[in-house]
Every structure is written in C-alpha cells, then in structure tokens.
Image (spheres, helix red, strand yellow):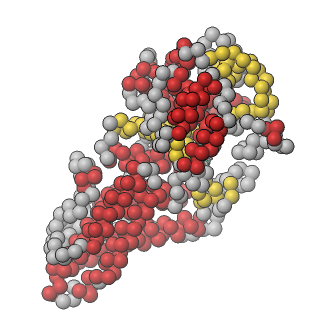
Amino acid sequence: MTFVITTPLYYVNDKPHLGSVYTTIICDSIARYKRLAGEDVIFITGVDEHGLKIQRTANEKGIEPKSHCDEISEVFNNNWKNWNISFDKFIRTSSKNHEFVVNEFYERVKASDDIYMGVQKGWYCVGCEEFKDNPENSSTYKCPIHQKNLEWKNEENLFFRLSKYQKEIEKIINEPSFIEPIERKNEIINFVSRGLKDFSISRTNVSWGIPVPGYDNHTFYVWFDALLGYVSAISADATEHSLEKSINGGWPADVHFIGKDILRFHAVYWPAMLISANMKVPKKVFGHGFLTREGQKMGKSLGNVLDPDLLLTKYGNDPVRWYLIKDISLGNDGDFQDKRFVDIINNDLANTIGNLLNRTSSMSRKWFDNKVPNNEKILSENKLENSAKIAVENYIYNFDNYKLDLAANEVLSLAINTNLYLNDNQPWLLIKDKDNLPLVKQIIYNVLESTRIIGLLLIPLLPELSTKINEQLGSIYREEIPWKQQLSWGLLVSNSSLPKPTPIINKLEYEQHL
Ligand code: MSP
C-alpha cells in the first residue's frame, strides 16, 4: 500500500528554522516507521518559491528571484540531508513539472465553472501571504503572527468559488479523523460555520509566479500554486500528463503535517479546490503546535532564534530528535529549554539506555566468553518479557495514532524497567556462587534481549543511535525479515558473539548560551 506523507513546502525567504526542522523530523520518523511496517512510502518535502514575500526578499538582496530561490532551495535540500531526513521527493514550486500540474489543475477547476473575475479589496499580510479576516477590529493593523503592518489591496483578481463547497467542506471537516488534534478541529468548524467566502487565486502585482493562461499580467496566488506542490511532487520527473501521473502515482496524501497557523488553507481551501478538480481530498491534516524558546516566541527582533545548524553540529542529530519527539506532545505547543535538553539527553539516552547496554554487554563478555549467554528459560514467570510485550503493543498503537511522544516514552519505560530488573536481580552478586550460573545466564540474556527490542523500537525515532545499539549487540537486525516480526521476544541468538562495547552516546555539557 502507498503511504503519502508531506511536510509543508517551506518558504525560501530564509534558511530552515527550528520549527521547520521539527515538522520534518516528525514526518521523517513516521515515514521510517511506515517503511518498517512494510508500506510503500512517498515522503514529500520541498519549497514554496513564488509570491510577493519571496519577490521582495530577492529584491532586497538585489538579485533575481530565480537565483535567490536556487540558492535557498539548495540550502534546504542539503539541510535535510545533513539531518538524515529520508525524504523521497523534494519539490520546488518553480520547477517546470509543477507549472504543468498547476495549469492542468486550473483547467479542471475552470471547467467546473469555479473561476470568475472579481475585485479583491482587503488587508493583506505579506508574511502569511493571506488576507486577514477582520483587521478593522485591530487598532494596530498588524499581523498577529508577523507583527508587521498589513497592506491594503484593491485589485482585479480571478476568484475561486469556495462558497459553493460549504456543504461538502462541512461534511469533510466533521469526519472523525480528518483534522487532528481535536482542538484545532473545533477552530476550523467554527470558521466554516461563519460561511465560506470565495477567495482570489490570481495577482496582478506579482511577477514572480506562474502566469495564468489567458490573463496577461496575472500570476497564480502563491497558495493556489503551492498546495499543488503536494500533487506535482509525486510526478516530479514527468514532462506531460503530469497531473494524471500524480493521481495514479499515489494521490491522495495520507497525511499533511503542518503548523496550526496554516490549517485553514489545508483543511478548508485545499479540499474545496480538489473537489472542484474532481480529485480526492487528503485523508488527514495534522496541525501541530508552535515551538517557543525558554517560554518566549522565537523571533529575530527578540534575538532568541535558535539556529538548528548550531544544534546539529554541537549535539548531533539524535539528541535533537529525541527532545523534539519525546518531550513535546505532538499537537501541543512546545518549549525548547537548553538546560532541560541537556538533562533529558543525559538521563534518557546516556544513562538509561546507553549505560544499560554498556554494562550488560561488559558483564556478559566477562562471564560468558565475549558472548550472549544461553537462554536458559528457567524462570516460570519472565517479568521483562511481559514488560517488553506491553511496550511493543503500546508503541505500535501510539505510532499508528501519531502519538509519537507516547511511543518514545514506551521505549524509555522499557529501558527503565530493564534497569530495575537488573538492579533487583543483582547478577554481579549471584555470580559469586557457581550454583547460580544458569540463573545469571537467564538474567543477562533477558536484559540483552530487552535492549535488542529497545534498539529496534528506536529505528524510526533515532536512526543513528539505534544503529549503534544494533552493532553493539553483534549486528543482529535483519533487513530482509519484517521488522514487526523481529520485535517478538526471544530472537537474540544464544551464544552469539558480542563485540567490545564502546559508549553509544556521550554525555552533554550544559552551556548557558547556545
Ligand atoms: N509556504 C507555506 C506553506 C505552504 S504548504 C503548501 C508556509 N511556509 S513557512 O515556511 O512560513 O512555514 C512552514 C511551517 O513552519 C508552517 O507549518 C508553520 O506553521 C511552521 N512554523 C513556523 N513557526 C513555527 C514555530 N515557531 N514552531 C513550529 N512550527 C512553526 O507557511
């Protein structure tokens, strides 16, 4: 089965920030999980290159929008490679294939009689590339998100008949699994209940965009163009019939992951556009929360923007992934705190998981000739086996329901339980009496087996650390055997060799200013 997952297509006005890294890491984990579960995944990311905002950014730099976009798109592409993101498609909305798709799509919408010429008047935020609902209620006329002045627009634009789709949209947004999390769904239901208004899909003052066929100085509104990037990404290499190739190649998306500020575009405008073009709507739109830093909104003016590159070079990929996935409940806002970050990595990854593996492997090597001991199966009730079974079940349930923080916590709980088991049984005391040898073998086998399962469960979450755990246990993971099958208890081979342990993760030092 094909599973299509998307990140937002990021604006290329600036390099990636922590918010974009967050969404992309979440999608990467889910994509890895689905691949391990045997699904045929298309993981789409990319960049949103057109529009007034990008045109102005390039102008300010004194260069052509195209060269600006070439440069920043490359930064994004390389950035995701540096973060070890397993994307399958990287779409640029300035690409030729994308333009084909937008044109073909527009023709379909026009054929449904959903396009007409009108006059668009209103207050516009260039940062959001969006007309604001009720700025007359605001004394400042500033965008609440960007804190920048809104601009008055009054021009002839082509409109899309969104109002025609009121009933269909109401039905879609009320479907139980279409919008997550639930609080976001209620916001959208309220918005739609106020009545949908047609919106403009072309601009006359923006040259950096896809030209609208038949209307000389009109380019497509950047959102009309950008949302289609999710579709064109699927047929990225096609040169003709691109829309059809995308439709046959995996559309509709299973899930769009986005931030809460752009939910309306994805959960309301986008499905209506798709219905108009006789296409299927995405199965789910997940609006995650916003990241703050030490409790404050991150912003250039506040001087507290956390550069993800700095985090990556200083601490590595897995620590950042662990913090963002495990410490933030997906859907809620989350806070990045430097001290908490260091504490969590040291406690969870270095002490609880890293030390567990290291000390057990050392004991096993010392007592059992550098090998995994024999699985003696002498205990009638195997507590650790039960813990592992429960952890695996809960982990799968949570991952399937996009509760990644809970899935990560299941792995951590199993590691904590395994440490407790080791400390309760104290094999280092038991070994002093030769009669206890079978029991010690059983205990050590259990602990190593539990760490094997921990390593497997970490593959989608922490690809690098899980590889190191696997190597430390003698490279026992078999790609050719279904991953879920390998999560069963007891598959660690008795008397197999254990390589010399090295620390799988180093402890971090806390520094006041990152
Ligand atoms: N280009 C549009 C998306 C088009 S999708 C067809 C866009 N781009 S963006 O670069 O401005 O934003 C990308 C994503 O970053 C959005 O999902 C937005 O919600 C998210 N975030 C922006 N600031 C954020 C945080 N502080 N924290 C988490 N995510 C944040 O919008």
Residue lying at 79% horizontally and 38% vertically, measured from the top left: 135
Q: Which quadrant of the structure image shows residue 70? A: top right
Specify the farthest residue to the bottom: 433
- In this picture, residue 269 sits left or right of residue 85: right
- In this picture, residue 407 sits left or right of residue 132: left
- Residue 73 visible (yes or no): no
Q: Which quadrant of the structure image shows residue 40? A: top left
Q: Is residue 407 above or below residue 58?
A: below
Residue lying at 59% horizontally and 64% vertically, measured from the top left: 338
Q: Is residue 330 above or below residue 94?
A: below
Specify the farthest residue to the top: 214
- Residue 333 visible (yes or no): yes
Q: How many marks?
A: 0
* Image quarter where ligand 1 lies: top right
Q: Position of residue 46 (x, y in %)?
A: 52, 36
Give the camera-side residue of 65 and 241.
241
Q: Position of residue 170 (x, y in %)?
A: 56, 34
Residue lying at 61% horizontally and 37% vertically, measured from the top left: 264
Give the camera-side residue of 464 and 198.
198
Quadrant of the image for the C terminus? Answer: bottom right
Q: Position of residue 289 (x, y in %)?
A: 58, 51
Residue lying at 14% horizontally and 87% vertically, measured from the top left: 435
Quadrant of the image for the N terminus? Answer: top left
Give the camera-side residue of 331 and 203.
331
Q: Position of residue 205 (x, y in %)?
A: 73, 22
Give the camera-side residue of 488 and 22.
488
